[in-house]
Image (spheres, rainbow, N blue to C red):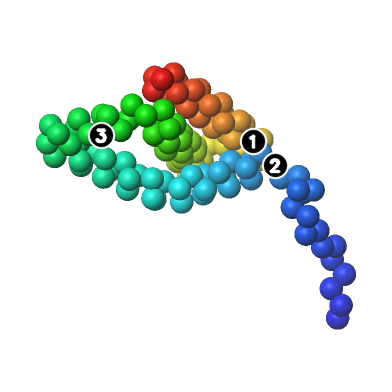
Amino acid sequence: MKDTRPVNLDISTIKLPITAYTSILHRISGVFLVGAVGLMIYALDLSLDSADGFAAVAAVLQNSMVKFVAWVVASGLIYHSVAGIKHLIMDLGYGETWEGGVLGSKITFAVSFLLIAAMGFKLW
């Protein structure tokens, strides 16, 4: 039996719903944070080890490229946390409909954007 289903291999032409983007970004941010949080924990350990270690970490964080990397890591952590809270709310039975999922995704993006922007203003 020949498979007659249409095949679309051009991913740029596929229109995904907002809920798919929320889910994909939640997974990507989780994978990203596995390595990034390890780096941040190392910096925290170094800064708590001694006064010299704290001074070294503080000096490194004055570099604008390092500040940008710290902002990217914080952005990933913020987004992942907000999306995780959305999942916990859905586990309680709220927003399980299609409309609720779309609204939850929009709220996730809006709250994440506001918190990430606030982190950027605080960092610089």
Q: Is residue 116 left or right of residue 59?
A: right
Looking at the image, residue 62 sits to the left or right of residue 117; the answer is left
Q: Earlier in the sequence, mark 3 or mark 2?
A: 2
Pointer 3 residue = 57
| SS state under label 3 | helix
Quadrant where the N terminus is found in the figure: bottom right
Q: Earlier in the sequence, mark 3 or mark 1?
A: 3
Question: Dot 2 corresponds to which residue?
Answer: 17
Instruction: Give x and y (percent) for residue 119.
Output: 42, 24
User: Neighbour class for label 3 at 10 Å: few (<14), some, many (≥20)?
Assistant: some
In the depicted structure, whether residue 85 falls above or below residue 30: above
Viewport quadrant of the C terminus: top left
The type of residue carrying mark 1 is Val
| Image mark for residue 102 | 1
Rounded to the nearest whole Å, what is the CA distance between mark 3 and mark 2? 42 Å
Callout 2: SS: loop
Mark 3: which amino acid? Val
Query: Can residue 45 be seen here?
Result: yes
Q: Position of residue 20 (x, y in %)?
A: 64, 45
* Element type where label 1 sits in the image: helix
Say which of marks 3 and 2 sits in front.
Answer: 3
